[in-house]
Structures are given as C-alpha cells and as structure tokens.
C-alpha cells in the first residue's frame, strides 16, 4: 500500500498493482534491495483516502534503544569535526534517529499525510506499508527529473540550513558550494552545455536551504548512469564519497535504510527522482524519525543539534493523533 502526492499538486495517487511494470521504487542510501511498487498509478479521492483503515499489524514493534541525547550527539559531532579537519574533507553528512512512541494514542496516517501536504506544498509527500516495512516522508529535494519528450534533465544542489529568518554565513555558503561543484562536474560529462541558476533560498517549513538548479539535455540512455553517479549526493553523504560512505558507517550506530536514499516515480511524461529526507520509519508502537546535517570544519556541535531538532519537526509537528 502506497500513497503519494507530487509537489504543487493536491491530487493523491496510489499504485494499483495491476501490471508487472515498476511504477514507484524506493532505493536505500547504501547498497541493498530497492522496494518496488508495480502497476499503474491511479488517483485516489480525498474522501476515500480519509476513510482508509490503516493496519500496522504487519510492522515490527518500535525498537527499545534509547536515542542519543544532546550531550552524546555533540560529543560525536566534535569527533566528526576533528575527522573532517584531519582528512581535509569539504563536508561529511552525519545523522541520528529520534524515537516518537505512540503513548495511549492512535495515529491517523491519512490526516498526518494531509498535514504534511499542507505544510510542505513543494514536497513529494508519501506514506507506505509493504513487506513488513512502513515509511512516511515529505521533502522537496530533487535528485533528478527527466522529461521523456524533450530529454531535458534537471537537478539541484541543496545544502546549508538555517531557521527561515536568520542570515546566511560563510559556514552555509561553504557547505553548499562543494555540493554544487560536485554535481556540475558530473553533469558536464553528459552534455556540452549545462545551465546553472543563481543560488537562491529554498524554503522548507520553518527552515531554509541554499539551492542551485541545473538543466541539460541528455541522451535518454544515460539517465540511469547519471542517477547512479549523483546518488548519494554530497547533500546526504559528503565529499569525497569514497571517504564519507565508510566514515558514516563508523560514526552512525544504525543503518540508514531508506533515509537519504531516493524515490523513483515513473510517470506518464517524466521520470522523477526525490531524495528521501524529512522522513520516518513506521513501527507498530511509534516512529523513528531520521535527521542529519552536513558537518564541515566550521561546524558547531550545538548548532548541529539544533539543526537536527528543527529538521525533526518537519514530521513531528504534523503528526495527527486520535484517542482510542
Ligand atoms: C541530511 C539532511 O539534510 C540535507 C539537505 C539539506 C540541507 C542539509 C544540511 O544543511 O546539512 C543536508 O545536506 C536531513 O534533512 O536529514
């Protein structure tokens, strides 16, 4: 069972499993099998969606481990900063998980989905339960967008985070620029001309990011190669990938699973790829919200903690509970 909504469009969709073709797939951050939804993409009315009875019984119980607290996280981030300085890395993305138990409360996923859709109109919002896994998420970072008729491919470099009303500093600018340079270098291998926009603010609820857009005409045969070269982008991994992927395994206690992976949507006229951030894994008794941030030599552990707290609100503030 999968439901999703595209950016700037209120229509809710599902996959009907009626055919063998892949409609939507969720790709993990690291190696591992993707989760596939086959069939045709079909519209669902809001009334039908709100009336759904969501059965969580196929999911596992919420893991009992305690979350990293602020002091533990800040101590870890201090170590990450030392590592980044020692290895002279432009950036390394480290994440943590936050447990949200459902205590004497019943969650309504359709209402939560609609709250997310309202708060993040520019996001891909989704919710699914399949093969014993459940996830919910809402984010607007595009890993790629391919127009089947014009062969135009678009992507974006998104990084740097502040509360909406604060001024950018050299820390965020220095964090986003290597992401844009990295993406541009890859794209230039696939087209003579790569159009690059000015860097602007990308608003996401209570926070903003820095964003640069890219556009190029590609050979359709190169689409899969471009996506596999781009993923994981430095916005979710760091630079260089060969150093950052093993470092993430060392600094993070738990696997990321689908967090920081990507979602591929095979639509009629286009193929859309969204980065899976601002998301949570669903369990029988609660959620695990995944949040991370780019660590540079100029990072402050306390500010990184605050940033991940703010990012976790994306999901947590939109949860809708009803009494039993
Ligand atoms: C890794 C996350 O955000 C990325 C996307 C935008 C800004 C980011 C940052 O400022 O660190 C991250 O690169 C996350 O939300 O978990």
Image (spheres, grey):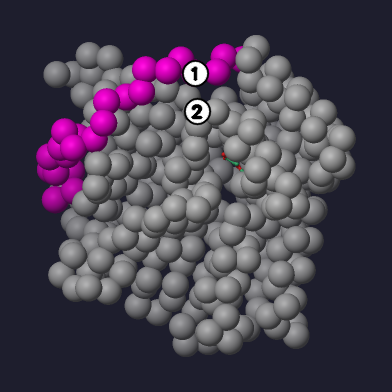
Q: Main secondary structure of the magenta part?
A: loop
Which quadrant is the C terminus positioned in?
top left
Q: Which residues are magenta?
A: 48-70
Identify the disc placed on residue 75.
none
**Residue 276 magenta-highlighted:** no
Q: Residue at x 80, y 36 (%)?
A: 84
Q: Is residue 4 in view from this perspective?
A: yes
Circles 2 and 1 in contact, beta carbons < 8 Å: yes
Q: Is residue 210 in view from this perspective?
A: no
Q: Nearer the viewer, residue 26 or 54?
A: 26
Q: Quadrant of ligand 1?
A: top right
Residue ID for mark 1: 67
Q: Residue at x 26, y 53 (%)?
A: 2
Q: CA distance from mark 2 to mark 1?
A: 7 Å
Residue 86's place in the image compared with 152, above or below, is above
Residue 120's place in the image compared with 106, above or below, is below
| Mark 2 or mark 1: whose residue is earlier in sequence | 1
Quarter location, residue 306: top right
Q: Nearer the viewer, residue 304 or 65?
A: 65
Q: Position of residue 103 (x, y in %)?
A: 27, 14
| Left or right of 243 in this view: 312 | left
Badge 1 element: loop
Q: Nearer the viewer, residue 107 or 78?
A: 78
Q: Nearer the viewer, residue 32 or 123?
A: 32
| Left or right of 324 in this view: 232 | right
**Residue 59 magenta-highlighted:** yes
Q: Rate crowding at label 1 as few (under 14), some (14 to 19) or many (20 or more) other CA atoms within 10 Å.
A: few
Residue 70's place in the image compared with 268, above or below, is above
Badge 2 element: strand
Q: Position of residue 64 (x, y in %)?
A: 37, 17
Residue ID for mark 2: 97
Q: Residue at x 46, y 67 (%)?
A: 272
């Amino acid at each position: 069972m999968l439901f999703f909504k595209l950016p700037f469009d209120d229509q809710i969709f599902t996959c009907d499993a009626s055919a063998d073709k892949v409609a939507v797939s969720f790709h993990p951050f690291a190696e591992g099998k993707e989760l596939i939804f086959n069939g045709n993409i079909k519209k669902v009315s809001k009334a039908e969606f709100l009336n759904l009875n969501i059965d969580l019984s196929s999911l596992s119980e919420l893991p009992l481990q305690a979350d990293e607290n602020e002091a533990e996280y800040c101590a870890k981030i201090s170590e990450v900063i030392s590592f980044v300085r020692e290895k002279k890395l432009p950036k390394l993305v480290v994440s943590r998980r936050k447990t949200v138990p459902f205590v004497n409360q019943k969650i309504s996923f359709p209402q939560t989905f609609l709250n997310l859709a309202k708060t993040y109109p520019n996001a891909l919002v989704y919710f699914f339960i399949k093969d014993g896994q459940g996830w919910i998420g809402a984010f607007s970072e595009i890993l790629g967008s391919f127009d089947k008729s014009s062969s135009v491919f678009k992507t974006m470099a998104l990084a740097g985070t502040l509360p909406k009303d604060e001024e950018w500093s050299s820390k965020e600018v220095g964090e986003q620029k290597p992401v844009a340079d990295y993406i541009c270098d890859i794209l230039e291998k696939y087209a003579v001309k790569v159009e690059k926009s000015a860097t602007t603010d990308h608003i996401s609820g209570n926070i903003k990011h820095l964003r640069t857009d890219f556009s190029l005409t590609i050979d359709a045969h190169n689409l899969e190669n471009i996506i596999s070269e781009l993923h994981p982008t430095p916005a979710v991994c760091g630079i260089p990938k060969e150093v950052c992927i093993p470092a993430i395994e060392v600094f993070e206690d738990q696997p990321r699973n689908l967090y920081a992976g990507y979602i591929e949507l095979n639509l009629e006229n286009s193929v859309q790829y969204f980065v899976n951030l601002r998301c949570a894994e669903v369990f029988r008794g609660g959620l695990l919200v995944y949040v991370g941030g780019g660590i540079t030599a100029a990072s402050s552990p306390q500010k990184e903690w605050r940033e991940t707290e703010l990012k976790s609100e994306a999901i947590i503030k939109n949860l809708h509970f009803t009494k039993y």
